Image: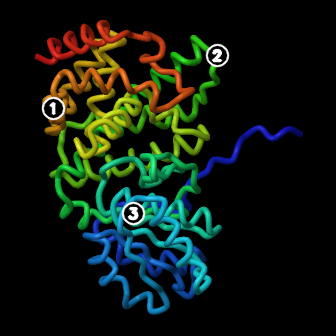
Amino acid sequence: MPILARMLPSPMLVDIRAGAVAALGDVLQDRFISPSGKVLVAVGPSQGERIWRTVQPSLPDAGIFAVEDASLASAGRLQEALSERGYDAVVGIGGGRTLDVAKYAATRAGVPMVAVATNLAHDGICSPVASLLHAHGKGSYGVSMPLAVLVDLDYVRSAPGRLVRAGIGDVLSNLCAIEDWQLAQRELGEPVDGLAVAVAQNAAEAVMGRTDTIDSDPFLVTLAQSLVLSGMAMAVAGSSRPCSGACHEFLHAVDQLYPGTADHGELAGVGALFATSLREDWPTFDALAACLGRHGLPTSPHDLGLDEEQFVRAVLAAPDTRPGRYTVLEYLDLDESQVRDRVHGFLERLA
């Protein structure tokens, strides 16, 4: 008899609530990740170290590794540290950069990884992708998704509000990525995974449909769930396609041309808004703009700290950031004059 279903990758545990970090030792033991607590804890430069001091008494056999930056070099050092004592697992505590380093090192070392997220800046919490710096820029690397995910709302609330709001932009950009994927299917025959689309789309719409803000715990829970679901959508698809389209081509271009301009999720939100204007899907454009604005997120080049000329340059450079990925930018294939016209129209629509 043929197998009539497929196995879906997912964490064995997702715990989103106030006080979730206190259960870390129990999670490691009860889920047989590390019954003895012999894990290497990778911590970020801010809240990660504070959380480590909280959980250290319950993990006397654990080691600690300070993640200096989100680079391949840092991930390599963490991988070497893992081999020194034969740790059972890696526990990454911090923001997206720390978690990406931990995911990459754990995958290369062949051990499981537990993610303890301290902010909700982007969908790297649970994704099978790590974005790391190298000598020639930044690259995206396939990794194993975390075996367990803990999001402690107490620490999320104490993170800078800008980092929490940025995750909203990243989740909403799923809607742009899905449109680009379906465009590639129509124009090139690229296969689209309907289940991955459903998961990514529902994640975005769950956030867009709420009228409360990051001051509300129910909203934070929904945002955290949506970020986790976005990561699972990528795992289902076997690529970042359901969550990365022209929106992310744009953000990678800005990162390359004007490093440090804005956070990942902030750029993804503006990129998604501009790509939606290219499609002339004005109902979606207005809904996206309203949601981003309601949460105090950037909607225009000026909000990002870019002038119109810099924005044009980023749009022109965007397709080269992901060779082989087909989006509305590749479909329209705009020259410089046409990009200027579209950017001008985008700004007029916002105004």
Q: Earlier in the sequence, mark 3 or mark 2?
A: 3
Q: Quadrant of the C terminus?
A: top left
Residue 247 shows which numbered tag? none
Q: Amino acid at mark 1?
A: Gly
Q: CA distance from mark 1 to mark 3?
A: 29 Å
Residue 140 pos. (x, y %): 50, 46
Q: Work out whether mark 1 precedes mark 3 in sequence or the reverse, and give the earlier one.
A: 3
Q: Secondary structure at mark 3?
A: helix
Amino acid on which disc 2 is placed:
Gly
The disc placed on residue 189 is 2
Towards the viewer: 254 or 126: 254
Distance, label 3 to label 2, CA atoms, is: 37 Å
Mark 2 residue crowding within 10 angstroms, few (<14) / some (14–19) / many (20+) = few
Residue at left offset 25%, top offset 61% = 156
- Do the numbered discs 2 and 1 sit on residues whose CB atoms are within 8 Å? no
- Quadrant hosting residue 17: bottom left
In terms of depth relative to the viewer, which is nearer, 347 or 52? Answer: 347
Q: In the picture shown, does residue 350 fall above or below 324?
A: above
Residue designated by label 1: 293
Q: Label 3: which residue?
A: 98
Q: Secondary structure at mark 1?
A: helix
Question: Residue at the spot x=47%, y=64% of the render?
Answer: 73
Q: Amino acid at mark 3?
A: Thr
* Residue at the right extreme of this rendering: 1
Label 3 Cα crowd, 10 Å radius (few <14 / some 14-19 / many 20+): many
